[in-house]
């Protein structure tokens, strides 16, 4: 019975994601730019995604401070950001306040911009 519930929940998630993807004006695929957005960084400045494109490829990660997988991923992304200097790394703290994201950045010494999507 549990397996059926998990399958149904998975199907519902995939169906809702697919309907969102089809609602986009343009389909995302390699070589096409992501839709532009502007978010505040954790220090109060503004970062516009399209302004980063002129500096090279952009790697964006979305995280939460309580996510165990994010805590494992963050040091790997920091290492990658140092290794691949031509890539612009940004991190978006999802639905958390800037102070929590700022503490996370300080704890992991994240060298790239951390944005707050409160």
Image: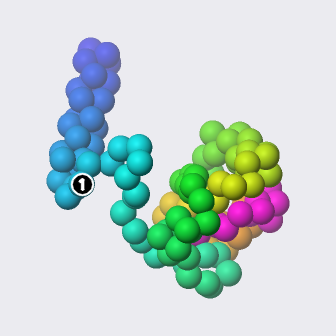
Looking at the image, which is closer to me, 80 or 40?
80
- Dot 1: what SS? loop
Dot 1: within a 10 Å radius of its alpha carbon, few (fewer than 14), some, or many (20 or more) residues? few
Q: Residue 75, can we see it?
A: no
Read off the residue under disc 1: 26
**67 sits left or right of 79 in the view:** left
Q: Residue 85 at what x, y percent from top left?
A: 74, 55
- Asked if the magenta segment contains residue 113, the reply would be yes
- Residue 8 to residue 74: above or below: above
Q: Which residue is drawn at 61% across and 66% down?
A: 55
Q: Specify the farthest residue to the bottom.
A: 44
Q: Residue at x 63, y 39 (%)?
A: 69
Q: What stretch is highlighted in magenta?
A: 105-118
Q: Residue 2 at what x, y percent from top left?
A: 32, 18
Q: Which residue is drawn at 71% across and 63% down?
A: 112
Q: Residue 94, can we see it?
A: yes
Q: Residue 19 at what x, y percent from top left?
A: 18, 45
């Amino acid at each position: 019975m549990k397996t059926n519930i998990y399958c149904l929940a998975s199907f519902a998630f995939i169906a809702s994601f697919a309907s969102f993807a089809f609602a986009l004006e343009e389909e995302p695929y390699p070589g096409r730019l992501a839709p532009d957005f502007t978010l505040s960084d954790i220090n109060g400045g503004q970062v516009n995604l399209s302004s980063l494109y002129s500096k090279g490829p952009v790697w964006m990660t979305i995280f939460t401070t309580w996510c165990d997988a994010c805590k494992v991923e963050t040091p790997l992304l920091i290492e990658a950001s140092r290794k691949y200097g031509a890539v612009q790394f940004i991190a978006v703290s999802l639905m958390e306040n800037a102070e929590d994201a700022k503490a996370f950045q300080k704890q992991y010494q994240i060298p790239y911009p951390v944005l707050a999507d409160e």
